[in-house]
């Protein structure tokens, strides 16, 4: 029986205690707002101050996103252009019959790869040019 009593006492101590507002949050609420309910008034005041902070940070985030997207597009352009060049080199090697058994299969495979990587690198080039022109137009 004693153990059960101890368990009840420990479970009662784990209950959440009511949290009182700090002095800083009380000072933000104007006297006219204090007349109404405290919790809703403090939420309204903090929501107004947060909206101003969000607008400022959104402009900064957009600038960072465009920089990151330009870097990403440039890196992808470089990778796919290098893959295009490598596939062109292998196409030229296999067209001369370097490996006599399966040269036609490899020639066709690398020809398709070169076409695909060429189109993808061209698409990234167009996207990169669009980002650069948009960035130049924003600065004006």
Image (cartoon, rainbow, N blue to C red):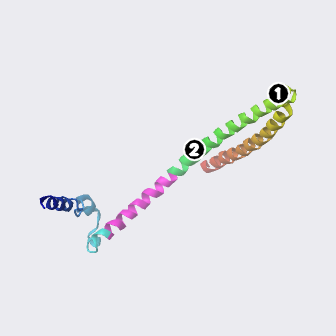
Q: Would you place residue 61 above or below residue 84 in this image?
A: below
Q: Horizontally, is 14 left or right of 64 in the view?
A: left
- Specify the quadrant that holds the N terminus: bottom left
The verdict on residue 131 being magenta is no
Towards the viewer: 96 or 62 = 96
Which residue lies most toward the front here? Answer: 1
Residue at image position (75%, 31%) is 86
Label 2 residue SS: helix
Label 1 residue SS: helix
Residue at image position (78%, 38%) is 114
Q: Position of residue 104 (x, y in %)?
A: 86, 34
Residue 93: mark: 1
Q: Position of residue 115 (x, y in %)?
A: 80, 41
Kindly report which numbered mark, 2 or 1, lies closer to the viewer in this rendering.
1
Residue at image position (81%, 34%) is 106
The answer to which of marks 2 and 1 sits earlier in the sequence is 2
Q: Position of residue 124 (x, y in %)?
A: 70, 44
Q: Horizontally, is 85 left or right of 66 in the view?
A: right
* Residue 129, picture quadrant: top right
Q: Which residues are magenta?
A: 40-59
Q: Magenta: predominant secondary structure element?
A: helix
């Amino acid at each position: 029986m004693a153990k059960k009593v101890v368990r009840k006492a420990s479970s009662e101590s784990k209950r959440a205690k009511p949290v009182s507002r700090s002095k800083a949050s009380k000072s933000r609420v104007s006297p006219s707002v204090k007349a109404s309910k405290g919790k809703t008034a403090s939420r309204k005041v903090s929501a107004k101050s947060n909206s101003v902070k969000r607008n400022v940070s959104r402009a900064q985030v957009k600038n960072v996103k465009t920089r990151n997207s330009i870097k990403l597009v440039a890196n992808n352009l470089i990778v796919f252009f290098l893959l295009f060049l490598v596939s062109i080199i292998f196409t030229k090697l296999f067209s001369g019959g370097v490996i006599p058994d399966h040269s036609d299969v490899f020639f066709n495979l690398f020809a398709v790869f070169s076409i695909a990587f060429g189109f993808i690198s061209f698409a990234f080039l167009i996207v990169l040019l669009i980002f650069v022109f948009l960035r130049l137009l924003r600065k004006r």
